[in-house]
């Protein structure tokens, strides 16, 4: 299937590690011009090298998703070089392991920080790209949420923030003024994904028996997902083939979650 992504311009927030990097590489392989940003220059350089080694076009920015000025700068510089922004993937986030199991013992600032890093980061970047997408009458906005934005579970500040991201995408998808300009808004909700140097890898190393029990109990496939499996779903959502797909929240979890829809 031709996804119709050749020469489309994509921005992936947090696109230099884990799911974000996998999305950047997958979109580049489909012919997109890809822009990524991170606070860490070494990760930017490594990701750009991987994309360019496969013949892809890429730009990298050292920027903070918590800064509106930084987000506006990234979007402006991409548009100046490539004259468009067709695709935005809101991947920056985190906080699922922040705080404590005892919510009353958790600093109230954690709630605000996780909300800002997830929901408000998506708001800032989405609002920055919408004028360009409306002008070109085509756009795809995909936000990476979590199965814990679709159902109860996880730490409440994280679940709350991810649910809000999904609500943002659904609400924007309902706006005829945007939909009739060819812009779609969707969420992808990963389950347990094995990402190097993050929580699940550390858990598997520190508590192998506990992790094995979790896999047997919670993961029907008997394994963690991979960033590349999430990226493949994102690529289809961004494609010209997915014009009718808008307002959806798609779990990519191998059957882990319990929600019916």
Image (cartoon, rainbow, N blue to C red):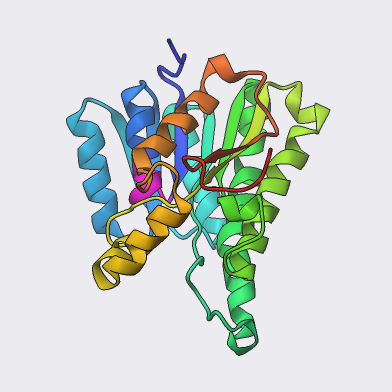
Residue lying farthest to the bottom in this orientation: 105
Residue 104 in percent (x, y) is at 65, 87
In the rendered image, the vertical position of residue 81 relative to residue 69, given as above or below: above
Horizontal side, residue 155 vs residue 208: left or right: right
Asked whether residue 175 appears in the rendered view, the answer is yes
Is 19 magenta? The answer is yes
Residue 200 visible in this rendered orientation of the protein:
no
- Quadrant, the N terminus: top left
Q: Residue furthest top?
A: 1
User: Horizontal placement of 64 versus 105: left or right?
Assistant: left
Q: Residue at x 39, y 54 (%)?
A: 216
User: Which residue occupies 28% across, 61% down?
Assistant: 197
Residues in magenta, as a range: 14-22
Between 2 and 147, the one lying in front of the other is 147
227 or 238, which is in the foreground? Answer: 227
**Residue 38, how many percent across, how many down?**
38, 55
The residue at the point 52 percent across, 31 percent down is 87
Q: How many marks?
A: 0
Indicate the quadrant where residue 81 lies.
top left
Name the foreground residue: 58 vs 83: 58
Q: Is residue 69 above or below residue 7?
A: below
**Residue 169 rendering spot, x and y as whole percentages:** 68, 41
Q: Is residue 122 magenta?
A: no
Image vertical order of residue 41 relative to residue 91, above or below: below
Q: Quick one: quadrant of the C terminus?
A: top right
């Amino acid at each position: 299937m031709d996804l119709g992504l050749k020469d489309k311009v994509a921005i992936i927030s947090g696109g230099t590690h884990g799911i974000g990097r996998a999305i950047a590489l997958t979109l580049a392989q489909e012919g997109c011009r890809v822009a990524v940003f991170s606070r860490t220059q070494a990760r930017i350089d490594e990701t750009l090298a991987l994309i360019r080694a496969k013949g892809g076009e890429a730009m990298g920015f050292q920027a903070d998703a918590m800064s509106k000025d930084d987000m506006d700068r990234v979007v402006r510089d991409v548009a100046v070089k490539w004259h468009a922004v067709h695709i935005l993937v809101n991947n920056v986030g985190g906080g699922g392991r922040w705080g404590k199991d005892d919510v009353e013992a958790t600093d109230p600032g954690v709630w605000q920080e996780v909300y800002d890093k997830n929901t408000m980061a998506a708001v800032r970047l989405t609002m920055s790209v919408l004028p360009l997408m409306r002008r070109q009458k085509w756009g795809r906005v995909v936000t990476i949420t979590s199965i814990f934005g679709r159902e109860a579970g996880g730490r409440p500040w994280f679940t709350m923030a991810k649910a809000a991201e999904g609500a943002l995408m659904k609400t924007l998808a309902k706006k005829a003024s945007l939909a009739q300009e060819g812009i779609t808004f969707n969420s992808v909700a990963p389950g347990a994904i094995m990402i190097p140097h993050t929580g699940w890898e550390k858990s598997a190393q520190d508590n192998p028996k506990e992790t094995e029990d979790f896999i047997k109990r919670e993961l029907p496939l008997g394994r963690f997902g991979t960033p590349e499996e999430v990226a493949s779903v994102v690529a289809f959502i961004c494609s010209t083939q997915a014009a009718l797909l808008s307002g959806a929240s798609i779990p990519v979890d191998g059957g882990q979650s319990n929600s019916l829809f």
